[in-house]
Image (spheres, rainbow, N blue to C red):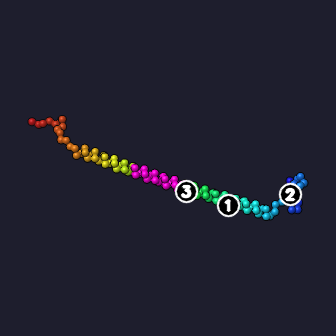
Amino acid sequence: MCVCVGGGVEEPSGTLVASKTSSAITTEMASQSQGIQQLLQAEKRAAEKVADARKRKARRLKQATRRQVQGMQSSQQRNQERVLAQLLGMVCDVRPQVHPNYRIAV
């Protein structure tokens, strides 16, 4: 247990220790305040970096999605043309022939 004596603090061992002056306390508080400000600034920079990274990720995702959609559309267009050409070929390529079950009436 410490006992306050005059302008200092007496320790249990009996030695007198000078208490901190108001200027020392002010300096310490200013130092702590400066440290807090540095932490806040670092936190702000980190938040900005995270926000930028999220924006870049969203941009890359949009680009990848756009490329994928364009690829599917071009594939669909090629397949559509191929299927239409095949269908038209089957419809237009008529080969008239007599059905094997047809009986000629006499």
Please tell me which of labels 3 and 2 falls first in the chain: 2
- Residue occupying the point 83% across, 60% down: 19
Q: Position of residue 105 (x, y in %)?
A: 11, 37
- In the image, residue 69 lies in the stretch drawn in magenta: yes
Q: In whole angstroms, how far apart are the C-alphas of marks 1 and 2? A: 32 Å
Q: Which residues are magenta?
A: 53-71
Please tell me which of labels 1 and 2 falls first in the chain: 2
- Residue occupying the point 70% across, 61% down: 34
- Residue occupying the point 62% across, 59% down: 44
Q: In whole angstroms, how far apart are the C-alphas of marks 3 and 2? A: 53 Å
- In the image, residue 106 lies in the stretch drawn in magenta: no
Tell me if I can see residue 51 in this picture: yes
Res. 51 mark: none
Res. 17 mark: 2
Which residue is identified by label 1?
A: 37
Q: In whole angstroms, how far apart are the C-alphas of marks 3 and 1? A: 22 Å
Q: Secondary structure at mark 1?
A: helix
Which residue is identified by label 3?
A: 52
Q: Is residue 83 left or right of residue 61?
A: left
